[in-house]
């Protein structure tokens, strides 16, 4: 019998759960992946984690610094490398698949690596999971559902139609479809989660919140796309990690779960909160042209995850989470400063 109440981010109290002993975490040197690795090491004392990460511009080995060496193995490699993937899968009992090209703006400038990593890479992992009977949790995004109108009272559910807008979200949608097909056709034991926008420490500075914070810290103006009214449904990365672990260990095989923390906010309000929290004039930013195809609003209905698995977010005060994220970027300047010029040069080239 599986006990459905979640003991707030620990394994204590679980009666019967799938508790993997050797877990491969793809993309474990990225933002959410590294947070998840830390979460597992802190909360699942019997698990050994193998991180498989190519260390693209978005991956950083320092994201895993300080974690115990006897609990963690780091393998630098590509999820499209069949031989390497098979050698790792032959010794693992679960994979949590975060590795992806993850930035919409980059996907518009050059979709090529998105097709390769997000689609071909997921296919390579699924084939290895099929061969070695490895449990497969696929980490995906709410962006596969396209967008909602600002005045639409509805939210995305597990039954919403797939309507991806960007090269990024269309490749994530494709990867979700592959995962479902490998379950239905070959019986690969999968679960899928589609999560809303994450924020927190270790997020690459190309992304909305860290870009604004680090612009302010380097004396640049924050930049706001379009009219700034696009709504994102923010969730703290630690709540996402806890939800992924819960789905991996207690979710029903073949099922999809939406993860969201009722954090709808428009970009203008988020930017003004950042400026206020950093002691700046809330209107001291530049309006820039909009992203082509920019989704208007995302909103998650996480009822299934809450009622079936008992998940609850812990970080429900967005302003407090934002403040601690700002503090992290202030305290960890060496982590991001070397990337700042090149990141802004990419944006300058597209007028953003
Ligand atoms: N950031 C969000 O708000 C969000 C929300 C929902 C879902 N997701 C999903 O979560 C996952 C992680 O997102 P993130 O924001 O942490 O991304 P990220 O860009 O910070 O990290 C991606 C990681 O994958 C690695 N990687 C890229 N290509 C690889 C390859 N071919 N082989 C091996 N490793 C490779 C990178 O080196 C990096 O460490 C993605 O699948 C993304 O679609 C993200």
Image (cartoon, helix red, strand yellow):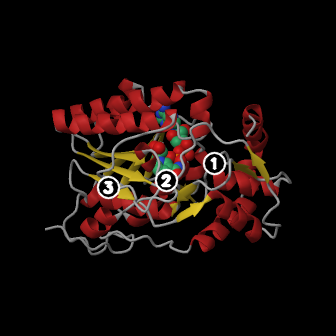
Q: Position of residue 86 (x, y in %)?
A: 32, 30
Front-lying residue, 139 or 106: 106
Give the spatial CA distance, label 1 vs label 2: 23 Å
Which of the two labelled residues, at mark 3 and mark 1, occupies the earlier sequence position?
Answer: 1
Image quadrant where residue 39 sits: bottom left
Q: Residue at x 36, y 24 (%)?
A: 83
Q: Residue at x 19, y 66 (%)?
A: 16
Percent position of residue 47, x then y: 35, 56
Badge 2: few (under 14), some or many (20 or more) residues near its Cα, within 10 Å? few
Give the vertical position of 24 relative to 44 (above or below): above
**Residue 81, relative to residue 303: is it above or below?**
above
Label 1 vs 2, first from the N-terminus: 2
How packed mark 3 is, by other alpha carbons closer than 10 Å (few <14, some 14-19, many 20 or more), is many
Circle 1 sits on which residue? 207
In the rendered view, would you say 33 is above or below 201? above
Closer mark to the observer between disc 3 and disc 2:
2
Secondary structure of the residue carrying numbered label 3? strand
Name the residue located 37 percent from the left edge and 33 percent from the top edge: 174
Q: Residues within 10 Å of mark 1 (few under 14, many from 20)?
A: some
Q: Is mark 1 within 8 Å of ligand 1?
A: yes
Furthest residue to the left? 1
Q: Is mark 3 within 8 Å of ligand 1?
A: no
User: Which numbered disc flags the more N-terminal residue, 3 or 2?
Assistant: 2
**Residue 28 visible in this rendered orientation of the protein:** no
Q: Position of residue 299 (x, y in %)?
A: 45, 58
Q: Is residue 34 left or right of residue 193?
A: right
CA gap, disc 3 to disc 1? 24 Å
**What residue sits right under mark 3 in the picture?**
257
Which mark is drawn over residue 149? 2
């Amino acid at each position: 019998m599986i006990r459905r109440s979640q003991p707030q981010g620990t394994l204590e109290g679980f009666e019967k759960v799938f508790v993997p002993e050797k877990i491969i975490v793809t993309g474990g040197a990225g933002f959410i992946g590294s947070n998840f690795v830390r979460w597992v090491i802190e909360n699942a004392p019997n698990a050994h984690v193998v991180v498989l990460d190519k260390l693209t511009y978005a991956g950083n080995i320092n994201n895993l610094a300080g974690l115990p060496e006897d609990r963690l193995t780091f393998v630098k490699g590509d999820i499209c490398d069949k031989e390497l993937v098979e050698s790792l899968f032959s010794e693992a009992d679960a994979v949590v698949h975060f590795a992806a090209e993850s930035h919409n703006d980059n996907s518009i400038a050059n979709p090529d690596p998105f097709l390769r990593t997000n689609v071909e890479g997921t296919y390579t992992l699924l084939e290895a999971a099929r061969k070695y009977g490895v449990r497969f949790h696929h980490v995906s995004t709410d962006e596969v559902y396209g967008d909602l109108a600002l005045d639409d009272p509805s939210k995305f559910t597990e039954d919403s139609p797939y309507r991806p807008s960007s090269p990024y979200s269309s490749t994530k949608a494709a990867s979700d479809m592959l995962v479902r097909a490998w379950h239905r056709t070959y019986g690969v034991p999968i679960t899928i989660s589609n999560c809303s926008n994450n924020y927190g420490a270790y997020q690459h500075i190309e992304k909305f919140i860290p870009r604004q914070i680090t612009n302010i810290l380097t004396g640049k103006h924050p930049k706001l796309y379009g009219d700034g009214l696009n709504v994102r449904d923010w969730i703290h990365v630690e709540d996402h990690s806890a939800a992924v672990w819960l789905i991996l260990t207690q979710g029903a095989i073949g099922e999809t779960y939406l993860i969201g923390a009722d954090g709808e906010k428009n970009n203008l309000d988020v930017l003004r909160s950042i400026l206020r929290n950093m002691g700046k004039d809330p209107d001291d930013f530049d309006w820039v042209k909009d992203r082509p195809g920019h989704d208007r609003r995302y909103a998650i209905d996480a009822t299934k995850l809450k009622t079936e698995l008992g998940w609850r977010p812990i970080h429900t005060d967005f302003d407090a989470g934002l403040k601690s994220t700002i503090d992290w970027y202030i305290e960890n300047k060496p982590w991001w400063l070397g990337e700042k010029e090149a990141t802004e040069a990419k944006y300058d080239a597209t007028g953003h």
